[in-house]
Amino acid sequence: MKNNFIYLDNEEKSSSNQNKPFVYLDNGATTKVDEETAELIKKNIIEEYGNPSSIYEFGLNSFHNIENVRDLIKEKINAEKEDNLIFNSGATESNNFAIFGMAELGLKNNKKKLITTNIEHGSIKAPSKQLQKKGFEVVYLNVDKEGFIDFDQLIKELDENVFLVSIIHANHEVGTIQDIERIGNLCKEKNVFFHIDAAQSFTKIEIDVKKQNVDLLSLNSHKIHGPKGIGALYVRKGIKLKKMIFGGPQENNLRSGTENIPGIVGFGKATEIAFDKNEEKVKGMKKLRDYFIAKVLEIPNSHLNGSKGEKRLCNNINITFDFIEGEALLMHLNMKGICISTGSACSSRSLEPSDILISMGRSHEQAHGSVRFTLSKYTTKEELDYALDCLKESVENLRKLSPLTPKQ
């Protein structure tokens, strides 16, 4: 069993901590870069470093590398060749560009209403709040106890004043998968633009921008075993967003600056690898996810947050443990070499309870006692069994110390 783990080899660790296993269960925060992808990035940095704006062959090779990746990603989401795909720094930038760009378009047409949800990523919530300060109306759709949006509320709020509906595809904390096709159809009927944040869902769930009537879509690389600092915003042909960064003609004259070519080729390679035997990989993650959930729920006073089965992201597990703090559990597992989170990575340093779990009906105490485990294609059953043993021991020990635990 021991030889199948990665071992931390920091020389400064005490002898008692040497050779402890390393089990990474925070793939919703970021993922290990595939070795093949890393090698391609290295080659691009060292050997294929031409500027894509240069007109000689060495520079044009870089330009063609970018366009090949652009075409590949468009193909994987069933976009048209004429549709736009803007490479940028990641899904956070994509979400900001989508919200602010569409708000500016909306103003030109006297539309000042945005519809989103109570369970969005911070990169949707924060821009939405900024728009409210500027006089826009923002409607936050309610969700049920599993995190699914209220369709009656959406139908009621869809009117001629709406410039955009923005809804996360698969939730980053609890893994709930929204019915994107139904939402897209409703938006199309009302002639309203529809944006989805697909940072967690890309390569794990089918995305078809035509069938699902998606007009804008946010993607990133580092959640699919690609490099950090690179993502993209898909924009349907005919939507004319205003330029966001000035100084050059790059990215269809929407985002100036020399492109991150190593990141882009890495993103492309990660996408290519992810879609190779994709169904098999997703099926394997689902099997391990369900195994882990069943075993964790054997711990008394533990509760699954989010949905079950096919309406849950294949690698996501979010559990509430009554009577203990999630941060304390995280640190206990960290001492055992296990990486988990108490929410999304972008908010994990906050001591505030998850507003997503609060929106789903959990109490403040339950939200504080929740942790997230996210798997990858590299996760093994052996790693999960080790994590389960440590988890059960840590929960038991923390409950013994907790003043919240009912006395026997």
Image: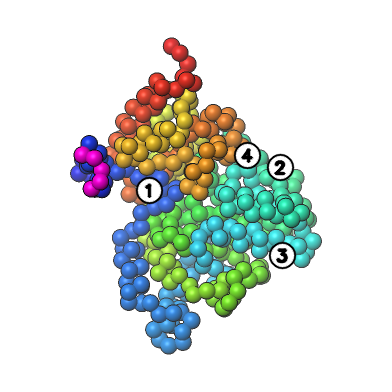
Task: Spot the residue most to the top.
Answer: 408
The residue singled out by tag 3 in the image is 105
Residues in magenta, as a range: 11-15
What is the secondary structure assignment of the residue under circle 2? helix
Q: Circles 3 and 2: CB distance less than 8 Å?
A: no
Q: Tell me if 239 is positioned left or right of 335 in this view.
A: right
The residue singled out by tag 2 in the image is 153
Residue 373: image quadrant is: top left
Type of amino acid under label 1: Ser
Nearer the camera: disc 3 or disc 2: 3
Q: Circles 4 and 2: CB distance less than 8 Å?
A: no
Q: Nearer the viewer, residue 248 or 196?
A: 248
Cα separation between marks 1 and 4: 27 Å
The residue singled out by tag 1 in the image is 376
Which residue shows up at 56% across the image and 74% down it?
256
Q: Tell me if 21 is positioned left or right of 364 in this view.
A: left
